[in-house]
């Protein structure tokens, strides 16, 4: 499936959506492991991805490595703040997937979360030759990245007219795969639906349930887990969606899952007293970004002229006008609404959003039922003016990703700045400098064609690109596939 370039207007909208969240959100981290950080001559390297949940009680991780000079004996998350003590045993093996929680024997405490945020935790892989650690890497904050996939579903193999689509998103640690699937036109009653894996002889590896739409999250610790091997199969096009019916028990319509662009759906709400029936002169506006797999909404709501605010919420006409998400108080409210929140972004609520049944309501002492409100309606992503200066400097995702032979790296500057954009290997070695000079405020981009500073093609694999300006540094991951 071809990759789709996301327009710069969307990037402008994204800078609105993700500025200064008022509610706590997931945080992501990356560790690049090597012998230099461990004080050894080891040629081994590794990379770890870590995701801290929004209530800061669980740190999920996926760590991979290769090239050790001797047999691995153990691995841990250690703390510089606690004298290098080993806090979490991450086991042995080339791929380590797991979770460190506040309920563990050695718990993830608020103090340890603070140390994590401060860059005081590191991952260490011990070996027979280097019992104290052969390779290690500091765990540092990084942007949360997701990899997106799509499937076009049809009855080509059975000669039936049914069609559908699937949107899937793999999270930062590659431990959760969120999905949203819609279809229509079956010739018989649906009996089952699955994700199948050709690498496992076509076995059904994820049950999807019946009905349209279907949504859910496939996790690393499910009864039939999303393993590292299955993630690799997903990335290499070995998986497909299959919908079974009474007429076609082995599958009436299906579609292969391929990498795709993380294309969102965008919504806006314009709030006033007329919609609330109050006659208030106060106003407001909200922008909402529904993620590719429909498992998260990022929001940014601002108001003007509101006095005595007591609360603000997203309400649902489909649930009797009830509150479905508290968005806080103040002139500016931003954050994200997730599928696993206490009041979740459920499939029925996504359906309500698409049907125009959600609205934003701002309550005050004068109007407890709501002084201003506005319905959330779809807009074309990118309707924010592209020549407006971004509200925050940001490094955006490259596209396409994975890529071959070239990829475009985009960024946003809130003010004029000297910009340096570099590419690094997993080992931390510098590969190329794409930009090193002054840039005006706004949106910019650079193209990397998979060559190093000497113009030599580099090998397939994972690379990192880093944007540095005065007071700002951010790093994202990209994958070159040849």
Image (tube, rainbow, N blue to C red):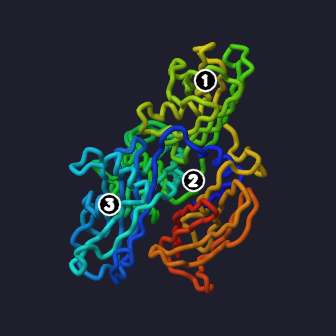
Q: Nearer the viewer, mark 2 or mark 1?
A: 1
At label 2, counting other C-alpha atoms closer than 10 Å, the crowd grade (few under 14, some 14-19, many 20 or more) is many
Q: Residue visible at 65% across and 61% down? A: 410
Q: Where is mark 3, residue-wise?
A: 79
Give percent across and percent down for residue 257: 48, 57
Give percent across and percent down for residue 202: 35, 59
Residue 265 shown left or right of residue 418 in the figure: left
Q: CA distance from mark 2 to mark 1?
A: 29 Å
Q: Is residue 241 visible?
A: yes
Q: Where is mark 2, residue-wise?
A: 262
Residue 288 against residue 358 in the figure, above or below:
below
Give percent across and percent down for residue 265: 61, 43
Q: CA distance from mark 2 to mark 3?
A: 35 Å
Residue 427 against residue 478 in the figure, above or below:
below
Q: Would you identify the image quadrant in which residue 430 lies?
A: bottom right
Give percent across and percent down for residue 175: 38, 54
Residue 300: which disc? none
Residue 361: which disc? 1
Residue 326 against residue 320 in the figure, above or below:
below
Identify the element where label 1 is drawn.
strand
**In which quadrant of the rendered image does the N terminus lie?**
bottom right
Of residues 98 and 311, the one nearer the viewer is 311
Residue 131 shown left or right of residue 297 in the figure: left
């Amino acid at each position: 499936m071809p990759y789709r370039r996301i327009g710069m207007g969307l990037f402008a909208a994204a800078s609105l959506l993700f500025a200064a969240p008022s509610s706590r959100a997931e945080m992501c981290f990356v560790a690049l492991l090597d012998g230099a950080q461990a004080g050894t001559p080891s040629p081994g390297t590794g990379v770890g991805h870590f995701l801290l949940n929004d209530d800061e009680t669980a740190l999920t991780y996926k760590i991979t490595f290769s090239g050790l000079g001797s047999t691995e004996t153990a691995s841990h998350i250690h703390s510089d703040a606690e004298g290098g003590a080993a806090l979490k045993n991450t086991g042995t093996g080339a791929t380590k997937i797991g979770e460190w929680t506040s309920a563990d024997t050695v718990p993830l405490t608020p103090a340890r979360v603070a140390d994590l945020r401060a860059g005081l935790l590191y991952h260490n892989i011990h070996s027979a030759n280097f019992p104290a650690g052969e390779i290690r890497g500091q765990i540092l904050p990084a942007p949360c990245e997701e990899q997106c996939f799509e499937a076009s579903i049809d009855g080509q193999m059975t000669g039936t007219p049914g069609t559908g689509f699937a949107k899937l998103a793999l999270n930062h640690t590659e431990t959760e795969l969120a999905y949203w699937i819609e279809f229509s036109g079956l010739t018989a009653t649906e009996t089952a639906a699955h994700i199948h894996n050709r690498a496992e002889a076509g076995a059904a590896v994820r049950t999807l349930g019946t009905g349209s739409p279907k949504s859910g999250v496939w996790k690393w610790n499910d009864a039939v887990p999303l393993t590292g091997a299955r993630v690799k199969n997903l990335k290499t096009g070995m998986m497909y969606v299959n919908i079974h019916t009474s007429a076609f028990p082995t599958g009436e319509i299906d579609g292969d899952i391929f990498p795709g662009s993380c294309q969102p759906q965008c919504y806006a709400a314009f709030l006033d007293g007329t919609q609330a029936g109050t006659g208030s002169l106060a106003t407001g506006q909200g922008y909402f970004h529904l993620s590719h797999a429909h498992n998260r909404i990022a929001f940014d709501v601002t108001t003007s002229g509101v006095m005595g605010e007591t609360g603000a919420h997203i309400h649902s006409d489909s649930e009797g006008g009830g509150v479905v998400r508290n968005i806080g108080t103040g002139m500016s409210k931003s954050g994200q609404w997730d599928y696993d929140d206490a009041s979740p972004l459920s499939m029925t609520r996504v359906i309500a959003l698409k049907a125009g049944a959600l609205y934003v309501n701002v309550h005050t002492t004068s109007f407890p039922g709501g002084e201003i409100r506005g319905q959330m309606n779809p807009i074309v992503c990118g309707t924010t003016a592209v020549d407006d200066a971004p509200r925050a400097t940001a490094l955006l995702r490259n596209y396409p990703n994975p890529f071959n032979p070239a990829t475009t790296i985009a960024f946003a500057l809130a003010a004029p700045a000297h910009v340096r954009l570099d590419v690094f290997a997993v080992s931390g070695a510098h590969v190329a400098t794409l930009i090193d000079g002054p840039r005006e405020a706004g949106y910019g981009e650079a193209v990397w064609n998979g060559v190093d500073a000497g113009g030599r093609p580099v090998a397939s694999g994972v690379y990192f690109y880093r944007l540095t300006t005065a007071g700002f540094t951010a790093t994202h991951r990209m994958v070159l596939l040849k």
